[in-house]
Amino acid sequence: MKLQTLLNKEFTLLDKKYDRYFLIVTILIFSILFLNIFEPFNINRWYSDSRIISFLRLSSYGVVVALVYLFTQFPLRKIFRQKTFQIKSFILWFVIEIVIISLVYIFLYGNPLGNFINDFIFSLKYTLLGICLPYSFAILIIYYQKHRTEIKTLQQKISRPSNSQLLGFKDERNKVKFSVRQSDVLYIESTDNYVSVYYSAENKVQRKLLRNTLKNLENMFENSTIVRCHRSFMINREKIEMIQNEGKKLSVKLSHIEKIIPVSGKFIPHFSEYLPGK
């Protein structure tokens, strides 16, 4: 059951065209270098060639593989409408590619009219051995790049506040003029037809001027921690550092702010939870 589940799992590493091109180029370069430098399977003894001819012949093996993969990863996948793979279909597709490469080698370098079965087994064996290393290397690089991109995107999302954490400050025409993280807002003060929004940024208190009224902002932020406390002030409840109760007068001290903000009698119930005996 677990094996069946694994085989049905999506294989997404070759879904993008860029990744397929990367696979083909990697196989081409790796094959040419590997065959000419290491000369595996005594391949240099298969023919008696001069050094230049031998280099061209060995390099042609890599070119043939790249051309076959160019065909199987683009036109052939389009013909069979194979846009995505499951693990089982990917394995099958890989086997088909190895078979095609082996057949191409026989027709280009062998004698298809001779002992075809033996030549095919021979070609299949060395094709598989020669392809596994560069193919695996390319897939690992694609896998690493994919997960590196996903991790980077996740880190950016974590470091960047989501829209739900941002408060959009609208002017009297209901147009958002700027946005501030709710947790950074300190208080809002009314000045004639404008309001001054005080907030913390880069460890400093910043101020933004907005043409609007506290009444409008009170309605706008009724479900937030920004509450009205006076006819001229709104404060962020999360920034309350101290509440001072002197008879019927109540005042609030906010973090990072020296200014003492008064609380009008009609708004005292909003802060009753902070008062003794309430």
Image (cartoon, rainbow, N blue to C red):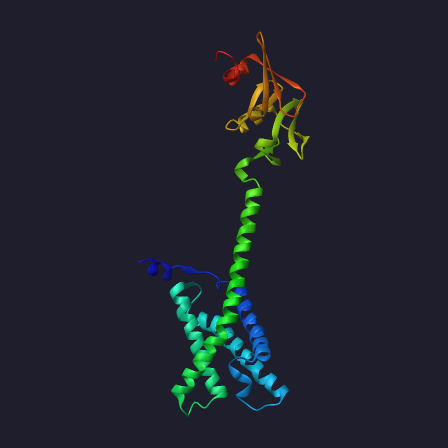
Q: Residue at x 59, y 18 (%)?
A: 242
In this picture, residue 72 sits left or right of residue 246: left
> Which residue sits furthest top?
247
Q: Is residue 200 visible?
A: yes
The answer to which image quadrant residue 61 occupies is bottom right
Counting the numbered discs, the total is 0
> Which residue sits furthest left?
1
The answer to which image quadrant residue 263 occupies is top right
**Image quarter in which the N terminus is found:** bottom left
Q: Which one is in front, 230 or 95?
A: 95
Tell me where residue 188 appears, x and y as whole percent: 62, 25
Q: Which one is in front, 176 or 119?
A: 119
Tell me where residue 47 appears, x and y as whole percent: 54, 90
127 is higher (above) or lower (below) than 77 = below
Q: Is residue 74 visible?
A: no
Q: Residue at x 55, y 64 (%)?
A: 18
Q: Which one is in front, 277 or 121?
A: 121
Tell me where residue 29 appears, x and y as whole percent: 58, 73
Tell me where residue 87 appears, x and y as whole percent: 40, 63
The answer to which image quadrant residue 45 occupies is bottom right
Q: Residue at x 54, y 29 (%)?
A: 220
204 is higher (above) or lower (below) than 264 = below
